[in-house]
Amino acid sequence: YLLPLSVSLDIKTHRNNFMLRHFCDGVLEAIRRIRDSRPKATISTTVKIVLLRLSSRVTQLTSSVMGNLPLSTCSNRKIDEKSKETLLSLQTNDADFTALDLAIHKNVVTRHGSCPRTISSWKQFGILIGNNVRLRSLTLKGGYVEITAEELRCMKAFCKGLSHNQSILTLAFCDIPPSGVEMFSYFRPFFESNPNLENVTIIRSGISNDGMKYLCDSLRGLKCLRSVKLNRNFIDFDLIRKFIATINELPELTELNLSGSMIDNAACTTLAKLLTNPKTKLKKLDLSENAIDDDGIFVLVNALKRNNTLESLDLCGLDFDMLGWEALATLVCDTSSINSTFCSNHTIRKILPRRIIKSYLALNQSIDKGQVARQKVMEYHFVLNNFDVRPFMSMDPRYLVHVLAFFSQTREGSHCSVNASVCGQSVIYELLRNTPQMFHARKCGVLQPK
């Protein structure tokens, strides 16, 4: 699928940098249009070689994009190799260049080089990323250094070009100080125009009241967002509750990380609304290193009794004692009665730290939740000599047939500590042996309830 495109250029006749820049832009635009019209097509080897031969001129072009000096005078200005390679990869849509770490402050340097300097260079950089179709992850690093009004204007210009990108799947903000949270509002056009965005991460940032408003307004309405990580940030209790209320409106959310974000017992009430939402698809919840005690655990447990989607819950570093652990154990397997055991939570597979409920969680690993319920009833009510026939004595005979069918369908599970199949047959045998007056034998030899 090589493109039938050949390019020849006499560098000596193109000494004007302005003409060279427009030449490169024209070649890239032609390649981009052909690629869009032919999804399986790739840039020809000839074009790649020509672009590499222009490396001496591309260095000057790169210096202009980075904003060091105007294009006409940038020939005497040097640029670091990392920044040059980054820009060249973005321009050529390098298939191996899928993640970009971008520094917001001039004193912060990432593995991909230094940041642009002027508003115009930031705007050009945003356009490069906006036209790129290979980039999958973008991380903005602030270094927790005070962000000036000029730098905020640079980010606003950058976001205008970024809003055209639809290939980025993960957007992350790291070490953003309170003076820079206004930039969250600048990303709203990008959020609205990128239907493929799946992950948003904010780490170690100071989010004020205005910053939380900007963030919630930007995230609200994202239909495809699957993961939100807001860990180790400096957020007030009231603000985190507003954030959770916004998250509850995301229909495709499967992962929520709020570790180290000062979650308290009051915020657990808002989390309970998320967990009990019948439309929720949340599978993973991280609440580690927060100010949650036994009262908060009780609220979460009551909510999880009505939840059948959550599979992982991280509670490491929380200040709760044995009362909280007993409530979690009862959530996974309530042994107070057969019906309570059958109606326990059979979905959640991992609770960190595991401690005393490790054996309970082992049963929940099976995909067949009906089989999990049978195994729990077998193991905690009919193991060994712990057989109580009294619940069956007062049962309506019409329902007894379903009870026998329930035990007969029990199969041995890989995570069950007893042979559930043999145990189910033993229950039927004990029931017949202890209550023969409840059954009669037909000529065919099949027992039927009277």
Image (spheres, rainbow, N blue to C red):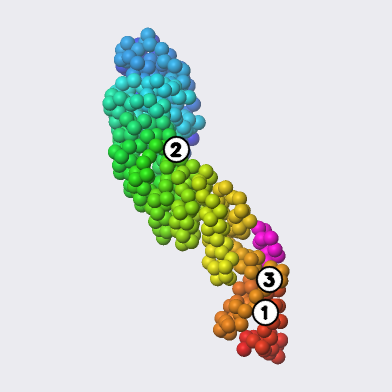
Mark closer to the chain start, 1 or 3: 3
Q: Which residue is mark 2?
A: 232
Point 38% across, 25% down: residue: 145
Q: Nearer the viewer, residue 120 or 424?
A: 424
Q: Residues within 10 Å of mark 1 (few under 14, many from 20)?
A: some
- Spot occupied by residue 79 in the image (x, y as percentages of width and height): 41, 15
Q: Which residues are magenta?
A: 411-423
Residue type highlighted by circle 3:
Asn
User: Helix or strand or loop: what does disc 1 sit on?
Assistant: helix
In this view, the mark in front (1 or 3): 3
The disc label shown at residue 130, or none: none
Residue type highlighted by circle 2:
Arg
Q: Residues within 10 Å of mark 2 (few under 14, many from 20)?
A: many
Contact flag, marks 1 and 3 (Cβ < 8 Å): no
The disc label shown at residue 431, or none: 1
For the C terminus, the quadrant is bottom right
- Spot occupied by residue 319 in the image (x, y as percentages of width and height): 50, 46
Q: Nearer the viewer, residue 71 or 419?
A: 419
